[in-house]
Amino acid sequence: MAVSDSLPWKPYPELSDAERIARANTFLESMRTRRSCRHFADTPVPREVIEAAIFAAGTAPSGANRQPWHFAVVSSPEAKAAIRVAAEEEERNFYAGVAGEAWLEAVSPLGTGPDKPFLETAPWLIVAFAQRKGGFDAAARVQNYHVTESVGIACGLLLASLHQAGIATLTHTPHPMRFFNRLCRRPAEEKPLMIIVAGHPAADATVPAFALKKKPLEQIASWL
């Protein structure tokens, strides 16, 4: 097996354990204020904010460092309107029974429905695509690995970055989502995973009380 060139590990700043704990808790307290927003204002958000967040997403670890993600960023009113029309068509089918009774019961505490006006109102829509094949050369078509896991991590970093910048977000996953390939002009072999709506909350935005309910540490972690 060929061994590539390596570089020395760039050390993190020298911190005491107390400082590390403090930093971890500071980030925790910030992320505890993150909420999914379903009521957006049309207030502009600088493109530089979105670019920095996508750059941060691009630092995510990935299988074989193939970085199998593409983020299609939509801001034109015409494109957003087309996405809303396509998404609401799928959502109407979803809520009309395609989802099944159990799924509809699960989302009922969130008060969601087929109408998605935020897809037009918010200044930015970021559609995350997973690339089964790719490479550093745009023409390369090599196999990618752990694609869904890698893109999921990148989307998590994207959400955290936007939150740190004071931008409200919402992850939206209409099903099926293949219309995104056509509307975002992406190849058929790329799989749309989610759309991240980004902008400022509307003045009258609310959050379902159910959304604030989080599992305790002992339920989400075990120590062996």
Image (cartoon, rainbow, N blue to C red):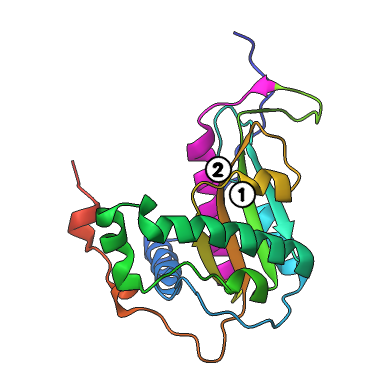
**Residue 12, numbered label:** none
Say left or right for 206 vs 136: left
For mark 2, does the 10 Å Cα neighbourhood hold few (<14), some (14 to 19), or many (20 or more) residues?
many
Q: Which residues are magenta?
A: 142-163
Specify the amino acid type for callout 1: Ala
Q: Please tell me whether residue 66 is drawn above or below residue 141 in the rendered image.
A: below
Report x, y in % for residue 96: 39, 59
Report x, y in % for residue 180: 65, 49
Q: Residue 22's quadrant in the figure?
A: bottom left
Q: Please tell me whether residue 107 is drawn above or below residue 157 in the rendered image.
A: below
* Quadrant of image for the C terminus: top left
* Quadrant of image for the N terminus: top right
Q: Are marks 1 and 2 in contact (CB under 8 Å)?
A: yes
For the image, the number of numbered tags is 2
Majority secondary structure in the magenta region: helix
Of mark 1 and mark 2, the one earlier in the sequence is 1
**Residue 151, numbered label:** 2
The secondary element bearing badge 1 is classed as strand
Report x, y in % for residue 109: 29, 72
- Residue 32 forms part of the magenta stretch: no
Give the residue pinned by disc 1: 128
- Residue 151 forms part of the magenta stretch: yes
Q: Residue 94's quadrant in the figure?
A: bottom left
What residue lies at 80% left-to-right and 31% top-to-bottom? 138
Specify the amino acid type for callout 2: Val
The secondary element bearing badge 2 is classed as helix
**Along the line of sight, the residue nearer the viewer: 30 or 209:** 209
Say left or right for 55 vs 221: right
What residue lies at 53% left-to-right and 39% top-to-bottom? 150
What residue lies at 43% left-to-right and 66% top-to-bottom? 19
